[in-house]
Image (tube, rainbow, N blue to C red):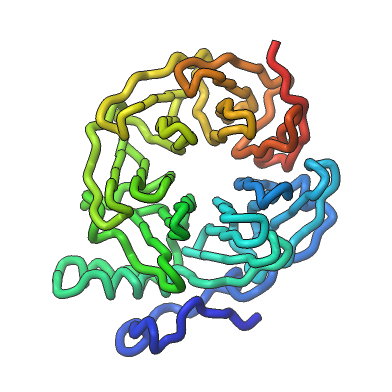
C-alpha cells in the first residue's frame, strides 16, 4: 500500500544524498493489517479514548474500537502490520499511534482508518537534520540511517497547544508542531541514549521518563530540557500528569513516586503490589487508577497520595487499560481484552 508522507521530500530536505541509501522498508511497514475475528483475543498493548469511543491497539497492526463501552468491538483499517505500542487522541476524531520500526500513524475519523505518516528511516533523517554541524551527532545519525527502521517508538504525549510528542528506545524523541516533525534528541540530556518509556505534557511543562531512573523536564514547551534528580534507579514505565498538576512516575517492581512541585522533589507512594506498574489514567470523576502487570488495580481518591488495591482474580497479564464507563474498565494484554466491573471493597 502506498504510504502517505507527513511532509513532502522537498519540505523535509532530507531525502537526497546518503539518506537514499537506507535499507528498504520491511514488508510489515507496507502491508495492511489482516482482518481477523480473533482481534479481541490477540495481544493488545495500548489503549485510549476518542471522545466516548474506546480504542485498543497491539501486535501485527491490530486495532479495535468500541462505541458501547467495550461490549462490542470492530477492527480498524491499518496500513501496516507493525506492533503498536501507544495511542493518543486530541479529540473524538484526531488521534495518533506509534510502534515498532519507528512507525507513526494518524487517524482523522476516530480510529476507524489510519495512515502511516513516518517510519524509522524518516525519523533517522530527522535526527540527521537536527545534528547540524556536530560531527559526533551526525555520525550517530548516519548510523541510524544505515540501520534502517529497526527501533521502536514506545509512547505518545499530547499537549493542549496541539503539539504531539513521541519517544522510544535508544533515546528516540520527536515533536510535531503544526504539520512538521522534528527531532528532540539534541535537546535532551541523555547522551547514553537510554530508552525513553513515557512522555506527558500540559503545554509549557513536558516530562519524559525512562530506564535507570531517567527523568527529564522542560518548562518552556520543549525548547530546553533538564535532567531531574531521580528518587529511583530502576526503570520508570509510565507517567501520569493529573488535572491538578501532580506528577506520578511509576514502573519497575511496583515503584510509584509522587511530585507536587514539577519534579523538584519526590515522595514514594506506598504500594502493596510488588509488581511492575504498566499503565495509569485519571478517571472522569478525578480519581486515579494504576494497573499492575498481574491485573491488579490501584485506586486513589486523594490525588495520588495513597492507593487502595483491587486484586485480580484470577491474575490477568495486563499491559494497558481504559475506563469504559463509571462502573467498568477494559483491561488488555497478551491474552486480549476483558471488560471488568470496577469495584473496590
**Position above or below: 18 against 201:** below
Q: Nearer the viewer, residue 282 or 102?
A: 282
Residue for point 39% across, 50% down = 203
* Residue 29 seen from this side: yes
Q: Is residue 61 left or right of residue 210?
A: right
* Residue found at x 24% / y 67%: 140
Which residue is located at x 34 percent, y 89 percent?
Answer: 16
In the depicted structure, whether residue 75 falls above or below residue 26? above
Does residue 194 appear to the left or right of 41 in the view shown? left
Q: Is residue 20 visible?
A: no
In-image side of 260 versus 323 (left or right) = left
**Residue 142 found in image quarter:** bottom left
Residue 247's image quarter? top left
The image position of residue 74, as x and y in percent, is: 81, 55
Nearer to us in this view, 15 or 90: 90
Which residue ends up furthest to the top in the rendered image? 345
* Residue sitting nearer the eye, 238 or 169: 238
Q: Provide residue 317's location: percent of width, then percent of height.
A: 64, 32
Which quadrant of the figure has residue 333?
A: top right
Image quarter (top left, top right, bottom left or bottom right) of the N terminus: bottom right
Q: Position of residue 49 (x, y in %)?
A: 65, 47
Compared to residue 17, the image places residue 154 above or below, namely above
Q: Position of residue 245 (x, y in %)?
A: 41, 34
Q: Residue at x 52, y 59 (%)?
A: 100
The total of numbered circles placed on residues is 0
Q: Give the quarter of the figure containing the C terminus.
A: top right
Q: Is residue 40 left or right of residue 167?
A: right
Amino acid at each position: 500500500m502506498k504510504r502517505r508522507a507527513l511532509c513532502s521530500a522537498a519540505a523535509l530536505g532530507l531525502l537526497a544524498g546518503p539518506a537514499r541509501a537506507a535499507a528498504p522498508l520491511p514488508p510489515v511497514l507496507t502491508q495492511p493489517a489482516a482482518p481477523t475475528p480473533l482481534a479481541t483475543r490477540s495481544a493488545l498493548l495500548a489503549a485510549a479514548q476518542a471522545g466516548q469511543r474506546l480504542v485498543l491497539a497491539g501486535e501485527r497492526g491490530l486495532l479495535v474500537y468500541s462505541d458501547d463501552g467495550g461490549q462490542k468491538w470492530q477492527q480498524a483499517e491499518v496500513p501496516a502490520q507493525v506492533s503498536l505500542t501507544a495511542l493518543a487522541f486530541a479529540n473524538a476524531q484526531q488521534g495518533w499511534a506509534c510502534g515498532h520500526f519507528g512507525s507513526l500513524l494518524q487517524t482523522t475519523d476516530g480510529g476507524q482508518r489510519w495512515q502511516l505518516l513516518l517510519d524509522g528511516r524518516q525519523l533517522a533523517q530527522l535526527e540527521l537534520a537536527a545534528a547540524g554541524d556536530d560531527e559526533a551527532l551526525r555520525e550517530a545519525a548516519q548510523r541510524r540511517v544505515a540501520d534502517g527502521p529497526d527501533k521502536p517508538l514506545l509512547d505518545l504525549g499530547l499537549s493542549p497547544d496541539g503539539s504531539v510528542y513521541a519517544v522510544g528506545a535508544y533515546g528516540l524523541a520527536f515533536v510535531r508542531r503544526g504539520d512538521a516533525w522534528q527531532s528532540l534528541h539534541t535537546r535532551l540530556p541523555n547522551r547514553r541514549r537510554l530508552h525513553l518509556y513515557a512522555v506527558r505534557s500540559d503545554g509549557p511543562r513536558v516530562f519524559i521518563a525512562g530506564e535507570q531512573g531517567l527523568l527529564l523536564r522542560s518548562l518552556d514547551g520543549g525548547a530546553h530540557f533538564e535532567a531531574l534528580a531521580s528518587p529511583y534507579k530502576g526503570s520508570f514505565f509510565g507517567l501520569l500528569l493529573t488535572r491538578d498538576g501532580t506528577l506520578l512516575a511509576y514502573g519497575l517492581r511496583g515503584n510509584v513516586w509522587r511530585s507536587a512541585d514539577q519534579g523538584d522533589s519526590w515522595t514514594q507512594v506506598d504500594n502493596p503490589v510488588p509488581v511492575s506498574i504498566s499503565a495509569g489514567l485519571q478517571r472522569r470523576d478525578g480519581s486515579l487508577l494504576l494497573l499492575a502487570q498481574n491485573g491488579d488495580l490501584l485506586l486513589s481518591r486523594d490525588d495520588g497520595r495513597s492507593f487502595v488495591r483491587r486484586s485480580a482474580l484470577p491474575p490477568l497479564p495486563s499491559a494497558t487499560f481504559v475506563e469504559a464507563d463509571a462502573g467498568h474498565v477494559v483491561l488488555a494484554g497478551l491474552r486480549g481484552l476483558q471488560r471488568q466491573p470496577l469495584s473496590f471493597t
